[in-house]
Amino acid sequence: MKITVDEIGSPLIEVKGLGAINAWPVTKFQFERFIAETNSFGDKWYDAVLNLNPRVSYKHFDVDNYEKLFMAGIRPREALEFAHWLGPGYDLLTVDEWRAFYNALGVHTVPEFHGELSISASHIWNQLARQSNTLKDLTLMHNGLIEWVKKGSKFVGLGSPRASFLHNVFNPMTDEWVPLKDRVFYLGFRLIRR
Amino acid sequence: MQKECFGIIDIKPFKDVAIVLDASESASECQETIVKTTIQLIEKLPRGSIKGLYFLSNSKQYDIDKLLRNSATWWEQNKLRGSFLTPVLEQIKESMAVVIGSGPIYDLEDWQDSFWNSNLYFYKVKDTLRGDWKIGQEFQELSQATSFLFDPILSIEITGTGFMPFYWNNPEYKLSFAAGVKLIGSNFYNPSVTLGYFGDDVKAEILRKSGEETIALKSVDYQEQDTWNTLTERESEIFHRASRGEEFTCIICGHKHPASRIRCDTNSILGEPIYPSLGKKRGFILFKENTNKVCFKFHPVSVIQIHDHSVAISLDGKEAQIYELDPTENQWQEKMDFNHYHASGDSRILFI
C-alpha cells in the first residue's frame, strides 16, 4: 500500500490490483472547489445539501463532529460529475472494490506521510491521525458515512456509521443499503482512480 | 563595534483593497444595487489603492473600468459558482478585501484566526454575508466603507537599540532626538525609504488611522548611485592646500584665506562658498582625490557616517557636531565640534 495525492492535493491510498482510492470520503472543501470552478450548482443547491448535513471547517472539526466535514446529502450522478471534473480515471467504487479496499486495510497502523498535501488535506490528515489507531480508522471505512458505490448500472450504499451519527446494524461486507430517497444526510462518497 | 547596515521599508501610503462582488443566487435580486454601490465605492477610494475586481468563488481578476458595460455577462459567468471566498483570498493575499453582496458566504470559518480576521469587510446590500462568524466587519453604509477601507499611514517612526541613521533617500523623514534617536516621517504620499544605519533590532512603527503595527526593516545590499562631480583645476588647488591646513588664494577675492575658511564674504554679507562649483547647496559634502582631479558629491541628509562608531550631525541646519556611540549605555552622545575636511576612509568631508 502506497500513499499518493490527487490533482487537488488530497491523499489517495494505492492498493495493488485495485487502484488509488480516496483516503477518506470526499470533503465539502474539495467539492466546493468543484462548485466554484464549474458554475453549474449554485447557492440554492448547496443550501439544500447543507440543510441535511451542515458544514464544519477542516480547521475546526473534531471527534464529535467529523461527519460534517464530508460531502453528504449528495446524489450519485453529482458524485460522478465531481469524479469527471477531477480527472481521467476517477469513478465511484464498485461494491467489490469497496469491500476489497476494506479488507486490504486490515489492521495496518497509520503511516507517516510527508507528501505534498493541500493545506486542508494536511489539517485533516493530522486531526484524523490523532484520533485513529489504525488506517481503517483514519480512512473512516467504518465510523464514517454510508458511501455511494456502483452495483451494475445502479447505485447502493456501503458503510457502517457510528451509532451517534446514524443508528444502524449494517455490516458493509454483507449488507447493501438501498436508498428510499436519494438525498440524505449520511450518504457521501469516495472515489477510485483505476 | 557598530556595523553599518542598509535596510528598506517598502510600503504604500494606504493598503490595497480588492473588491469582491457577489453574483451568486443569494444576491441575484441585488445585482443593480451591487453595481451601483461598487461604482460609488470606487469613486471614493484612492485610485492606486484598488487592487482588483473579483467575484465570489472565482480567482479571475476583472477589469474594473468595464464593470458597468459588462456586468450582465459577468453575472452570468458567476451566478452558479456558490458563495465561497477561498478562491479569491488564495489569489489576492496581503491586502484588504471588501465583499459587496447579499446572503451567507459558506467558507468563512476556514479563514477565521487568519490574516483576514482584520482585513476583510462585508458590505451587505440586503442580507448578511458574514452571518455569525467572527471575522472581519460588516456594514451597510457607504460612509462606513470608506472609513474602514481608506486607512492611510499617518506617521512612521524608525528606531532600535543604538540606532543612528547616516543615510536615507526619502526627504520626508527627519532625524529626531526627542525620545531617543528616531527617524520620523509623517503625512507623506510615499513612505518607502532605503536607509543606512547603525543599530540592532531596528524596526518601523507604523501609525495608521486604524491603529499601530510594527515591521522589521528588510535588509538590502546598498549600491551607491549618486554621481560624483569634479572641481575645477583652481578649486582643486585650494582643496589640496586647505585640506592640509595651509592657507590658500581665494578665487573670488584673490586674497589669502586661512585653511578653515569655507566662505568668502567679500561680495556679500552671508558669503559664498570658496568652491563656486558647489553652487548654493548646503549640507555635508564628500571630496575624493584622484590622481589629477578632485571629485565631490552632496550627502542627501543631515547625518553622515564618519567612522565605524561615529557620525556627524547637523540639527536644524546648525553647525555640525560629532556623535559617538557609548557602548555601555547603547546611546549616541555628542563628543566634539565637527572640523572641516574631516578624513573618513579615502574621503574628506566638509559641512557648508
Image (spheres, rainbow, N blue to C red):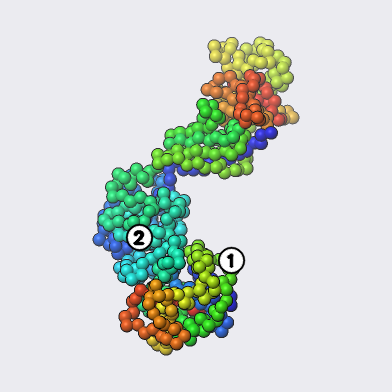
Q: Where residue B128 sits in the image (x, y, percent)?
A: 30, 56
Residue A82, above or below A155:
above
Q: Nearer the viewer, residue B163 or B331?
A: B331
Name the subunit of mark 1: A
Please name the residue that numbered disc 1 is placed on: A114
Residue type, numbered disc 2: Ile
At 52% from the left edge and 28% from the top edge, which residue is drawn? B179
Name the subunit of mark 2: B
Q: Nearer the viewer, residue B312 or B213?
A: B213
Q: Where residue B11 sits in the image (x, y, percent)?
A: 49, 43
Residue B209, above or below B135:
above
Q: Where residue A35 sits in the image (x, y, percent)?
A: 39, 68
Please name the residue that numbered disc 2 is placed on: B105
Residue B144, can we see it? yes
Which residue of the protein is positioned furthest toward the right in this rendering? B291
At 31% from the left edge and 49% from the top edge, which residue is drawn? B139
Q: Where residue B230 sits in the image (x, y, percent)?
A: 65, 28
Is the same chain shared between marks 2 and 1?
Answer: no
Residue type, numbered disc 1: His
Q: Residues within 10 Å of mark 2 (few under 14, many from 20)?
A: many
Quadrant hosting residue A190: bottom left
| Between marks 2 and 1 in the image, the one whose residue lies nearer the viewer | 1
- Badge 2 vs badge 1, beta-carbon distance below 8 Å: no
Residue B240, above or below B169:
above
Residue B163, above or below B96:
above
Quadrant hosting residue B303: top right
